[in-house]
Image (cartoon, grey):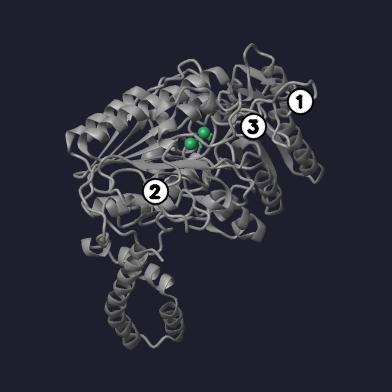
């Protein structure tokens, strides 16, 4: 066995022992002051399970109000403190076979190529999809929310997709406070469901919507209106028609059972409702006008026809369909949101629901003129922002992601700088910190957002703000004011989602150049870099058949993949500050993104908490 691992084990045992002694005194106190048998039995279970016990204790400290000592991380036995560390997340940068649809391979990426030459000691691959990041199955592609959650939290949490599955399967969703709250409107009002209609599993899933429709009607909803947002980003472009047909069939079945259920409005997710990080409130306003006011530039009597017709507009695709409302024979919208109605936003993922949640929930709201603000009972599928408690009502509790590496490091004196452009800003801050907005300690942190271009698809500007982000990171590194400088470089992902292969190649080159700027700064200050990604995207831009060849549609055309992938992502370490003996371990079972947090903590000179996924590195004495 590696000497370092033994040393850490010894240290951890010592730590655990001291924690036990202190805690046993506390437990004794509880036992003496309480004769409850249930407490005694759970205590004895905890004592027998050190991991569980540690977690209980840590959570107990947090609940009781934490002090610095409870956050204190142990010193790493070999790795020094005080190194400047750059953590670079290349969004949508996976590792795949080299071919013409692998834009990372096609692009000139000398910096990332040079890192790869350090394999296997300084460059490795980790899982970034499926159960490795808390998604329901290994058929689920990775995404930014779960990827950054895992990177920052160092542990794998059952994510929204899975939690909603469980709540629907057990029927618990209908017993909880959130559903009971909206149910109050079912007698007199309409239940409105707003969200992304696809089976992408990133923000929402069609099968969950189907179950919710069925369950809500069985629990008393008599009038239901669905406001759809078409996808084409997490699923193939053009698939919207099939999803709308499926939904229409379900609604027809409900109508046959006497429920007045219809689609009321729609629009493409990137143009209607699902903006994020306040990049462009007009997107949310277009949705508000269609969903709440029943007003849109396009009116149809049938949603399948709406989607088919709007897709015929020049350069149109599912992501950008203009807003439309469904009207009756007299031209009146069939489902504006009115006083007394209930509204559920059925996406489980947070980032692109926060803005609409604010519009639906906040009394004081000045981002656009809402014209009419109906008195509704509103619930999110999940609570989208735990810090803002937004929305205040929700059907399923979100994963409780606590004690993230960001919080630990800041509380251990690591001065932290984080930066991206608007479209990914929340990824390296909010998602990284366990879906929590704001600073842990404003005196030690600075988060910089570079405004993204607004109102364009990013294939038009594939370089995005990569250089600006890198220059901010460079300045932060050189300033000496920060110990960790963390960025997200969005290009591979944001341009990859457009399906424009040529532009994605330009995007990958731009991201690579940005990495170079950051690594040069690391070099200058004798620092360390950790370069990784949150999931794949740009490395595979075509749908593949089972044998891995590009799949063709019925007309013989290649099907461009706009979505993320199931590919692993690289993790590269290096820089002049890295001790020569540091290398990637070969004994970590199925390493994934969640193993990165402990790795970074080690490089800052600390041992990660014992319930974190193991570090990827070891220090071998020369
Ligand atoms: O919201 C999006 O843009 C896509 O659905 C997923 O992309 P992301 O997970 O990289 O943000
Ligand atoms: Mn991403
Ligand atoms: Mn993406």
Which quadrant is the N terminus positioned in? bottom left
Q: Of all residues shown, which one is farthest toward the front?
A: 622
Q: Is mark 1 within 8 Å of ligand 1?
A: no
Q: Nearer the viewer, mark 2 or mark 3?
A: 2
Identify the residue position indicated by label 2 in the image: 152
Asked whether residue 501 is in view, the answer is: yes
Picture coordinates of residue 256 (x, y %)?
Answer: 82, 42
- CA–CA distance in space, label 2 to label 3: 41 Å
Q: Tell me, yes or no, whether the two marked residues, 3 and 1, touch with CB atoms within 8 Å.
A: no
Residue in front for this viewpoint, 19 or 576 = 576
Picture coordinates of residue 446 (x, y %)?
Answer: 25, 38
- CA–CA distance in space, label 3 to label 1: 36 Å
Picture coordinates of residue 95 (x, y %)?
Answer: 53, 37
Q: How many marks?
A: 3
Identify the residue position indicated by label 1 in the image: 553
Residue at 62 percent across and 49 percent down: it is 138
């Amino acid at each position: 066995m590696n000497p370092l691992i033994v040393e850490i084990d010894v240290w951890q045992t010592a730590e655990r022992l001291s924690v036990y002694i202190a805690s046993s005194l506390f437990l004794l106190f509880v036992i003496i002051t309480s004769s409850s048998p249930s407490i005694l039995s759970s205590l004895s279970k905890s004592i027998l399970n050190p991991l569980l016990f540690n977690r209980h204790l840590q959570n107990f400290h947090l609940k009781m109000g934490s002090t610095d000592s409870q956050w204190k991380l142990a010193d790493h036995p070999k790795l020094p403190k005080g190194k400047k560390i750059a953590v670079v997340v290349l969004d949508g940068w996976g590792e795949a076979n080299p071919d013409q649809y692998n834009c990372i391979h096609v692009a000139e990426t000398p910096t990332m190529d040079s890192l790869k030459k350090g394999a296997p000691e300084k460059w490795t691959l980790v899982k970034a999809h499926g159960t490795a990041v808390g998604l329901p199955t290994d058929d689920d592609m990775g995404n930014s929310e779960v990827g950054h959650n895992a990177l920052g939290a160092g542990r794998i949490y059952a994510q929204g997709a899975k939690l909603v599955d469980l709540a629907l399967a057990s029927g618990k969703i209908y017993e909880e406070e959130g559903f009971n709250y909206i149910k109050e409107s079912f007698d007199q009002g309409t239940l409105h469901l707003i969200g992304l209609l696809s089976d992408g599993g990133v923000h929402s899933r069609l099968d969950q919507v189907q179950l919710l429709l069925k369950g809500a009607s069985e629990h008393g909803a008599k009038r239901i209106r669905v406001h759809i947002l078409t996808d084409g980003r997490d699923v193939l472009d053009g698939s919207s028609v099939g999803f709308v047909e499926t939904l229409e069939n379900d609604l027809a079945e409900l109508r046959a059972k006497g429920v007045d259920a219809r689609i009321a409005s729609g629009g493409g997710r990137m143009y209607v409702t699902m903006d994020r990080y306040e990049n462009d409130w007009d997107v949310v306003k277009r949705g508000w006008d269609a969903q709440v006011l029943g007003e849109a530039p396009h009116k149809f009597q049938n949603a399948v026809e709406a989607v088919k017709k709007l897709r015929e507009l020049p350069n149109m695709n599912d992501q950008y369909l203009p807003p439309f409302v469904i009207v009756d024979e007299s031209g009146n919208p069939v489902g504006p949101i009115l006083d007394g109605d209930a509204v559920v936003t059925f996406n489980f993922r947070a980032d692109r629901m926060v803005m609409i949640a604010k519009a639906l929930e906040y009394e004081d709201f000045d981002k656009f003129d809402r014209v009419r603000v109906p008195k509704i009972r509103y619930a999110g599928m999940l609570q989208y922002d735990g810090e803002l408690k937004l929305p205040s009502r929700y059907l399923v509790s979100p994963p409780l992601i606590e004690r993230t590496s960001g919080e630990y490091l800041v509380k251990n004196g690591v001065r932290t700088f984080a930066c991206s452009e608007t479209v990914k800003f929340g990824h390296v801050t909010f998602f990284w910190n366990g879906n929590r907005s704001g600073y842990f300690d404003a005196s030690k942190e600075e988060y910089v957002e570079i405004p993204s271009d607004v109102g364009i698809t990013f294939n038009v500007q594939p370089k995005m703000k990569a250089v600006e982000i890198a220059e901010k990171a460079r300045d932060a590194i050189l300033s000496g004011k920060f110990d960790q400088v963390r960025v997200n470089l969005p290009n591979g992902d944001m341009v990859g989602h457009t399906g424009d292969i040529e532009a994605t190649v330009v995007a990958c080159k731009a991201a690579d150049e940005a990495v170079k700027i950051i690594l040069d700064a690391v070099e200058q200050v004798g620092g360390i870099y950790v370069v990784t990604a949150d999931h794949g995207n740009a490395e595979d831009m075509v749908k593949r058949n089972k044998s891995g060849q590009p799949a063709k549609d019925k007309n013989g055309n290649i099907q461009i993949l706009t979505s993320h992938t199931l590919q692993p992502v690289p993790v590269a370490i290096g820089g002049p500050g890295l001790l020569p003996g540091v290398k990637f371990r070969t004994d970590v079972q199925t390493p994934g993104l969640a193993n990165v947090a402990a790795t970074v903590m080690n490089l800052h000179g600390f041992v990660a908490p014992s319930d974190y996924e193991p570090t990827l590195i070891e220090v071998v004495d020369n």
